[in-house]
Structure formats: C-alpha cells, structure tokens
Amino acid sequence: MSDKTMSARDVVGRLESGMTLGIGGWGSRRKPMALVRALLRSEITDLTVVAYGGPDVGLLAAAGRIRSLVTAFATLDSIPLEPHYRAARERGAFELTEVDEAMFMWGLHAAANRLPFLPVRAGLGSDVMRVNPGLRTVTSPYPDAATGVREELVAMPALRLDAALVHMNRADRLGNGQYLGPDPYFDDLFCEAADTAYVSCERIVDTAELTKEAAPQTLLLQRSSVTGVVEAPNGAHFTSCVPDYGRDEAFQQMYAATPYAAFAERFLGGDEPAYQSAVQAWRKERDQ
Amino acid sequence: MSAGRAEYCVIACAEAWRDDGEVLASPMGLIPSIGARLARHTFSPDLLLTDGEALLVGPDGTPEGWLPYRRHLTAVTGGRRHVMMGASQIDRFGNQNISCVGDWSRPRRQLLGVRGAPVNTLNNPTSYWIPKHSPRVFVERVDMVCGVGYDRAAAAGPSATRFHRLPRVVTDLAVLDFATPDHAMRLVSVHPGVTAEQVGEATGFELVIPDEVPFTREPTARELELIRTVLDPKGLRNREVPDPERAARDRGTPGRGVPGGPGGGGR
C-alpha cells in the first residue's frame, strides 16, 4: 500500500490549466483553503470550478482563475453575500452554470455512479432551465400507478471532475479521510466524482489512531478514491473546521471588506507558513 | 399586555406550521425561527426543528436526530418539510428571486444564487417571510425565477405541480396567500395598525383585496410570555421588525435624528 502524502505544491503540480475542479466544503465551512492558496500561487488558470461556493470561489474568481463556475450559491455564511464573487460576477469575469443545491448534489451522485445523468424534479418551472439551455428533460418510462401520468423530469447531467480538493479533520497516509464535525457536506461525493482527489487535513495520524476515540462512521473518505494527502494544520482557515476550530469571524470580516489586490498582497504572496504568520501578525496588530 | 408589530409577525409565521404534523419546520430568518419554535411549543408539538446546523433538536435544545445537508435535501424532496424562505423579489403568482437583480447574464446586483429555491418549491410546502413589504420586493415580474410560482409550475406540467404548494406570505404589514381562482396573491389579514390600502400601496402589482380584511389574530397571553421570556428574551425580533409606534415615538424625540413623523412627540 502506497504512502500518498505530498505537499500542497505537489498537488498543484499535478493540476493543469483548463481542468474541471471540484472543491468540497459548503459556503464558509471546511473549505480546503490551504490547497486553494497553493493554487493561487501557481500559474494555473482557465478552470471550471464546481463548488457549493464560499471564499474558495471568491478568491479564485477575484484572481481571474475561473473560466466557468458551476454552483448554486456563493456565501460566507455569517456574511450572506461573498463580496469578491459578487464583484467578479457583476463585471462578467466568468461563465456561470447556476443550478439548484439538490441538482448539484445529484450531478455529483451521477458522476460518482458513472451515470450520464439522474432524474430530478427540481429545476422544472424555474429559470434554472432558461439560463442553462443545455439542460434536458426525460419522461419516466413508468406510468404513475394512481394517475397513469408518465412524469417529465429534469435530467441532471453528471458533474464529472478532473480533480477534487477537500479538507478533513484527520487522515492517514494511505488516504483514508475522517471528518469529526457534525456534517460531512458532500466531500466523499466530490472525491468519488473525480478522476483524482486531493485531501488536505489538520493532522495525519496512524490508521489505528483514526478509530481510537471516534466512531467508524466518521471515516468519510476511502483511500480507493483518494490520490494524495496533504498535512495542512489550520488549512481550512478562515473557514470553519469544527471541532478543531470555528470560523475566524474577525478575519473573514476583514477579508470581505478588503479589496482583493490588497488582501492578496498581504496574505497570499508567500507560502502557507507565510500565510499563517501573516494571519498571526494581523491578529496581533488588531489586538493592540 | 399588548402585542407589538414583531409579535404579530411571529404569530403569523407560527400559523404557517399549524396542522403540519410531524414534518421539519425550516425557518429562514429570525422571526420565522421564533415562529416555528412557538408553534412547536404550542399548537404543533409534533414539528421537527433543527439547531441551524446538522442536528434535530427539541425545544430545549436536546438533540433527537442527525440532519446533515444531504439528509436535509432528502427531507425536502421527500416532502416531510415546510420551509419559510426569504425573497429579494416576489410576484403575484409567488415566483421568487434570490439570485440576482437585472439581466442574469450580466447582473446589476449579484445576490445569493438560486440556492435550494427550485427544489423547495417543487417538493414541499414553501412559505415566504418578507421583513420589509415594499414595491421593490413585490414586483410585477421577478428578474430570475428561483422559487417557482403557481403560473410557472402550471406551465411546466404535472411533475411540477404534483407537490407544489405556497401556503402563505408573511410580511411586516400583512399575511397573504394564493387562495384565488387563478392563484393570484391575495390579502388575508393586516397586522393591527395597518390598513389594506397601505398594503396595496406597498405592493408593486395589483393585489387581490377582499371587501373585508380581518386583523392578524392576537397572540394569547401564554404565547406572548413564551415569545418574551423563552424564545426571544433579548427582543431581537424588534430589530428585524421595529414597532411602528415606538419608531414614531423615537422619531419625535429630540436628538434622535429625523424630527416629527406621524404620531411623533408623544411619550
């Protein structure tokens, strides 16, 4: 069995411009921010990003790395609207495929199950159909027992990904990933829907350590669908990574109020340790 | 004890979940949250509530179930849920927009995105809460249909109408529904202190206004006590919907900014 540990830089080295990239987490929760920051330090661009959007989308959109975005929303949770995403969208910086939250989930399910699409009711009657003229409907081959009606449903296409990036609380060197918070979000689906999947985590531990105190159902990611593991303590910062830490609300507020160029200059110029020290310095300055 | 405007709003929201049985109450916004918990405490004891994250909880916060996002989406599509959403725009047939203002391809203002509005409206009863009733929100045509209204569901066919239902719209002024022959929005009740004409003027399309419009019902003494001492002891509800009488008094107080105003000056 192979050791899959690598650095964030190694991960980015395996990605290419033009790829379709799935990013796990939800809004401003458990986003693989260290991997996103590594991506921002690279030259990779022209991405199709598939995400339940948070600051990952805000940063990549502001930096001009996104050609096309597939999402149902972009939010910072405690700040309802993602300001950098908004600004990029209002200046027409990228193409948008806007689908409903459930359609998005079924697109991942379809990809994970190697199906071309899955039928969903969501979308019918809404402008999701108007703004996505490529979306098709299917008619059920089975008439309803009571009414005889054969329902017409939306055929949500598979959201197959070239690569997925997710962040876990713990992982082992083989790629088994563990979440210790209350919600798995859709991170396992992202990994299963992707040709390659890269997992950053707060701490890499021995396999036996994973279930020493936590129940086996916290083992969300199976190594068979994971390509690389990156140890990135505080790697979801400033999004939440419960129970290791909550969202850094003060930092998030500053992020939302700072023009992207100024934010990038102060926080994204160096490597991940440089980012973490810049955050510490910012905190010290603020507390004085 | 006389009720304030925010408390009538709480009551009107709570009533949305009456007779819903054992389903998940999904309130978005503060006043709907207080309303859902009030209903759970009183006339709809079988309701399921969440902690706003991934747990189902009893009224005292005791966990009774696990509801991460993907199971929440199953509750939506399975129909065992009644959501009360917000709306940046809503039209006469209940089409709702939270995505963007202006042309979708190059919006003037990007908002949240469609979120779960399409799946909600096609699969489980969906009510709306609008804290500031105005012609900017109540528009002739929404810019992007996220939540599906009655006309659009009907045009989309039986799969769209099968589980589609918009029980009510609650605002800071009134309660509205779609119980008309063509499902156009109708005024059901006004909160005390509000007139039907006022609601009509604050609505950017022609609202169905019956000859007799009752007032939103009074809270019971127990309901008021629950709201004030258990559900919202800090009075946060008054920030979401300021009481017009108190606001008028405040406006009339020297040193508080805007001078005068209706009913101002009395203390």
Image: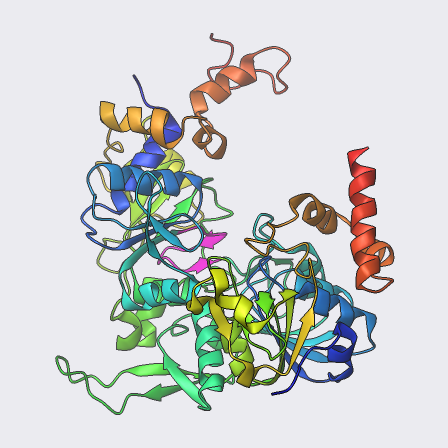
- The type of colouring in the image is rainbow
Which residue, as the protein is rendered here, is positioned at the far top? B267
| Frontmost residue, B116 versus B249 | B116
Q: Main secondary structure of the magenta part?
A: loop
Task: Give the image location of residue A188, x and y in percent.
Answer: 51, 75
Is A88 located above or below residue B159 in the figure? Answer: above
Q: How many marks?
A: 0
* Quadrant location of the N terminus of chain A in the rendered image: bottom right
* Residue at (24, 86) in percent of width and height: A150
| Frontmost residue, A185 versus B93 | A185
Q: Can residue B108 be seen in this view?
A: yes
Is A144 located above or below residue B44 in the figure? Answer: below
Q: Does the magenta stretch include residue B89?
A: yes
* Residue at (19, 39) in percent of width and height: B43
Q: In this view, does A156 lie to the left or right of B82?
A: right
Task: Give the image location of residue A105, x and y in percent.
Answer: 46, 74
Which residue, as the protein is rendered here, is positioned at the far left? A146
Q: Can residue A100 be seen in this view?
A: no
Name the image quarter holding residue A203.
bottom right
Task: Give the image location of residue B171, x and y in percent.
Answer: 39, 41
Q: Is residue A174 magenta?
A: no
Range of magenta residues: B85-97
Task: Give the image location of residue B80, x and y in percent.
Answer: 26, 61
Q: Is residue B162 left or right of residue B61?
A: left
Is A209 located above or below residue A152 in the figure? Answer: above
* Residue at (40, 46) in percent of width and height: B129
| Frontmost residue, B196 versus A250 | A250
| Frontmost residue, B256 versus A207 | A207
* Quadrant location of the C terminus of chain A in the rendered image: top right
